[in-house]
């Protein structure tokens, strides 16, 4: 595993994922490693078959990408990433599968990902993205727990 030359850090722009980006930035600076920030735009849900229902899919996807690019720009420019340069990658589809695929393509040495703490029926039914990445990744995965969960 050592030396760490490339760190991949997925983000959904939530508070827990911002904490993971902060840790990934610190590790990248410490190891003088490259940092790749990844955002996966989820696949669009199935739309009703009602012929009267109008939904402009290309426009919706364009807006999702624009919003993600703006958020990523703010995140990549944040003070948490001082001392390192971050590249950004945007992708579509199932988050866990895409994160693992991108980590392989990028030859990442480490994935730093936030846990979400999803509980109850949602976790039983869907599992968590972090859990799937841990199971499927070909490189080590560092999971970062949400600091707000520590007391819960």
Image (tube, rainbow, N blue to C red):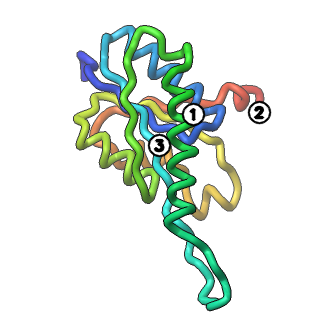
- Does residue 84 sit above or below 141 in this rendering? above
Rendering quarter of residue 48: bottom right
Give the image location of residue 15, x and y in percent.
Answer: 65, 32
Secondary structure of the residue carrying tag 2 is: loop
- Does residue 7 sit above or below 69 in this rendering? above
Q: Which residue is mark 2?
A: 152
Alpha carbons under labels 1 and 3: distance apart: 11 Å
Q: Which of marks 3 and 1 precedes in the sequence?
A: 1
Name the one closer to the observer, 134 or 10. Answer: 10
Q: Which of marks 2 and 1 precedes in the sequence?
A: 1
Q: Is residue 102 left or right of residue 75?
A: left
What is the crowding at mark 1: few (fewer than 14 residues within 10 Å), some, or many (at least 20)? many
For image coordinates 56% across by 76% down, the residue present is 46
Q: Which mark is residue 17?
A: 1
For image coordinates 31% across by 21% down, the residue present is 34
Q: Which residue is mark 3?
A: 39
């Amino acid at each position: 595993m050592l030396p760490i030359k490339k760190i991949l850090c997925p983000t959904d722009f939530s508070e827990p994922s911002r904490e993971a980006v902060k840790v990934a930035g610190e590790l990248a600076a410490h190891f003088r490693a490259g940092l790749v920030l990844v955002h996966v735009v989820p696949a669009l849900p199935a739309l009703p078959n009602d012929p009267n229902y109008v939904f402009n899919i290309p426009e919706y996807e364009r807006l999702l990408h624009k919003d993600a690019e703006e958020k990523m720009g703010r995140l990549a420019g944040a003070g948490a990433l001082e001392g390192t340069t971050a590249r950004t990658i945007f992708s579509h589809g199932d988050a866990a599968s895409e994160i693992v695929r991108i980590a392989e393509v990028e030859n990442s040495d480490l994935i730093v990902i936030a846990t979400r703490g999803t509980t109850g029926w949602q976790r039983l039914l869907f599992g968590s993205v972090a859990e799937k990445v841990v199971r499927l990744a070909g490189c080590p995965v560092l999971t970062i727990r949400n600091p707000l969960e520590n007391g819960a």
